[in-house]
Amino acid sequence: MFSKACEYGIKATIFIALKSYQGIRVSLKDIAGEINSPEAFTAKILQKLAKNNIINSTKGAAGGFDIEKNKIAEIQLAKIVDAIDGDSIYNGCGLGLSICDELHPCPVHDKFKAVRDELKKMLESTNLEELALGIKSGTSYLKI
Amino acid sequence: MFSKACEYGIKATIFIALKSYQGIRVSLKDIAGEINSPEAFTAKILQKLAKNNIINSTKGAAGGFDIEKNKIAEIQLAKIVDAIDGDSIYNGCGLGLSICDELHPCPVHDKFKAVRDELKKMLESTNLEELALGIKSGTSYLKI
DNA sequence: ATTAATTCGGACAATTTTATCTTATTTGTT
DNA sequence: AACAAATAAGATAAAATTGTCCGAATTAAT
């Protein structure tokens, strides 16, 4: 459904949010260890997230990544997905047509639209706070 | 959402179904031209569909691909997707965890489950006949 | 100032997906 | 039987995605 990069990006952001609530800035190494992802590849993804103003990155010793506490509840999953994979998942044509709309629909246009709209709605209505909370309370997990 | 191979596969199968209703067996060249796909790559996909008993392939002069008329309404989108992309789209974990279930869910497990279940339901309830009909009646299109 | 711990950025490498080419095989037609 | 028109199958190539490495830049601590 999503690219590997996007999967890592979502997990990383959740972990950073969780630690940010505790006032802790986390390093790349911590993140990669926690979400079980390749370090250097994760670094690239974090850079992208930082450039999209989803996370803060701080260079130097004692540097790392964090998110302002009061921003966490305002960051939707859609924003993360958009930063990494773009919006083609819920906007592009299901069969890859470059033009596909009500006037010139692909054979599955309507059927896909329903599913994609629900996906979009879900991504837009899910925020980082609730996801981080799930990890904190031990009802969900970031690895294995 | 789906791989390019799967997109081509779906479009090809719809076109083959449409022609099969008219008693016409279509060649690889016709198919690739109609759905605007690379010929040799499309050939590989058709082979896979044939091996999965979704389409028939006939070798030799006057050969090509077709589907028994009475099978067309029985072939669901899910069957085509499954043959080409497998079932990971609606069965795998949204964040790529190898184990992700009610007992050990990823942070987005429940939210994704809803969307994926709808996708699955849609794929399983959509059959080739209705898709081919859309093309036939000119209400949907296979290219551009 | 020096050092150590970090992220950044660019180059590179491996893997997967997509696409192509070439040769074999099959089959209808002459 | 020979030929032409197809698909099958394997090898190869190109492109995209995923993953790695290394030197540069930044910053806190000593």
Image (tube, coloured by chain):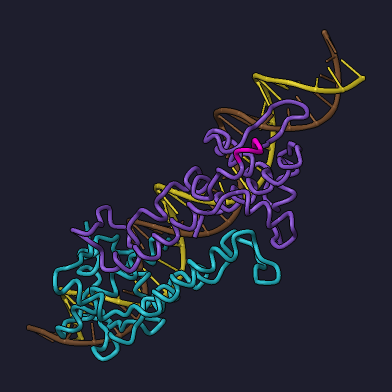
Chain colours: A purple, B cyan, C brown, D yellow
Q: Is residue B137 visible?
A: yes
Point 44% across, 57% down: residue: A121
Count the numbered circles shown: 0
Name the dominant secondary structure of the magenta segment: helix
Q: Camera-side residue: C28 or A85?
A: A85
The quadrant in which residue D2 appears is bottom left
Q: Bounds of the magenta span? A: A67-71
Q: Of residues A103 and B71, which is closer to you in this image?
A: A103
Residue A124 locus on image (x, y percent) = 48, 51
Residue B22 appears in which quarter of the rendering?
A: bottom left
In this rendered view, identify the residue nearer to me: B80 or A56: A56
The answer to whether residue B98 is left or right of residue B70 is: right
Question: What quarter of the picture does the C terminus of chain A occupy?
Answer: bottom right
Question: Compared with residue D27, is residue A105 higher up or lower down, i.e. above or below?
Answer: below
Q: Is residue B48 visible?
A: no
Q: Nearer the viewer, residue A116 or B20?
A: A116
In the rendered image, residue A16, in percent from the top left (x then y), is placed at 68, 43
A69 is within the stretch colored magenta: yes
- Seen at 66% across and 65% down, the residue is B105
Counting from the top left corner in percent of width and height, residue B91 is at 54, 71
Horizontal side of residue A134 vs A96, given as left or right: right
Q: Check the image and report above or below for C19 versus D20.
A: below
Q: Residue at the location (65% across, 37% down)?
A: A67
Residue A73 among magenta residues: no
Q: Position of residue A43 (x, y in %)?
A: 64, 39
